[in-house]
Image (spheres, rainbow, N blue to C red):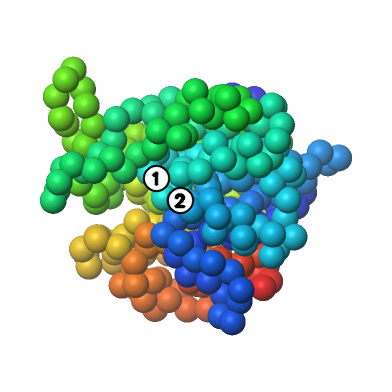
Amino acid sequence: MESPGVLDNLKITVLADDCVLYESPYLGQHGASFLLEGVSGRDTKRILVDVGQNFEALLHNMRIMGISPSVIDTIVLTHCHYDHTQGVARLLREIGRKDVQLIAHPGIFRPHFITEPYHRDVGIMPGDSEAEIEKAGGKLFLTKDPAVILPGIMTTGEVRRLTDFEKVNVAVKTMENGMVVDDLMLDDISVVANIKDKGLVIITGCSHAGIINIANQAKEVAGCSKIESIIGGLHLIEASDSVIDRTVDELARLNVAWISAGHCTGFKAQVVLYRVFAERFLPLRTGMQFELGGVTG
């Protein structure tokens, strides 16, 4: 991998989350989407991380925020789930170009479903297939390796599962050799920014790989040990109390400066995060903006 470098500035806008800012006009949805604006020297990239599941709500929020889809240079899909990917082809058509790079894990288009209480597809939907994405102007870049998008901002690549307590925590299935098997969600990736004089900002979709695994891999791929912040979903909503406590304890040991978690994190985990991190924890909300570790909005 090329040298990951550092960013001079990073602005993150939360375009979609399950909750919205108090007294705001934004629409919430079960899903997540973040717009990252990274500046490295004279270069600026606008990167969309996930698209939620409701294109109309996403576009509504972008219009209110004064953000045109045409500014998006790159799209990262953190994993296959419909609440992070549904409508990506429609968004590409709204962007209206034929050069929009879409970065994801090569396994993202696999069969992906639940079987209880009945069979239901929960992965990439037919309207967002490889063919539809390419037809809409997306240039697929599918890799298990970390990908540098701009000096100082990169993907984690496929995350190594090293902890003994972090599990997928959702009963999802896939197909192998004609047989239904457990899906280990190996396509779960995150985005990492290394900001000059600040440290790492980790943007997650759902953290199916485990947020501690993700954080440790982020430090390795970015070549930096200081974590300024973690923003996104931690998928602790169905985790046991012991797993929640262990996860938050490990985050504290990593000395993360501040955390903003929502979407699939779950209320119990948010309570524990607030108890441990106090004012350094913020529940994630649609409409939030983060810049160089500061928060506005």
Indicate the quadrant containing the C terminus: top left, top right, bottom left or bottom right. Answer: bottom right
Instruction: Give the CA separation, mark 2 to mark 1.
Output: 6 Å
- Relative vertical location of residue 114 with respect to residue 232 in this rendering, above or below: above
* 2 and 1 marks in contact (CB < 8 Å): yes
Residue receiving disc 2:
53
Indicate the quadrant containing the N terminus: top left, top right, bottom left or bottom right. Answer: top right
What residue appears at the point 39 percent right and 29 percent down from the top-left corner? 109
Residue 6 x/y as whole percent: 71, 42
Residue 151 x/y as whole percent: 71, 36
On the question of residue 39 being in view, the answer is yes
Quadrant in the rendering for residue 266? bottom left
Residue receiving disc 1:
82
Q: Give the left or right position of residue 198, taking residue 243 as reference.
A: right
What residue appears at the point 49 percent right and 23 percent down from the top-left corner? 131
* 98 or 294, nearer to the observer: 98
Q: If you read the primary sequence from the N terminus, does the residue marked by circle 2 or circle 1 appear first?
A: 2
Q: Give the left or right position of residue 86, taking residue 168 as reference.
A: right
Which residue of the protein is positioned furthest toward the bottom in this rendering? 23
- Relative vertical location of residue 173 with respect to residue 266 in this rendering, above or below: above
* 253 or 114, nearer to the observer: 114
Q: How busy is the neighbourhood of tag 1: few (under 14 within 10 Å), some, or many (20 plus)? A: many
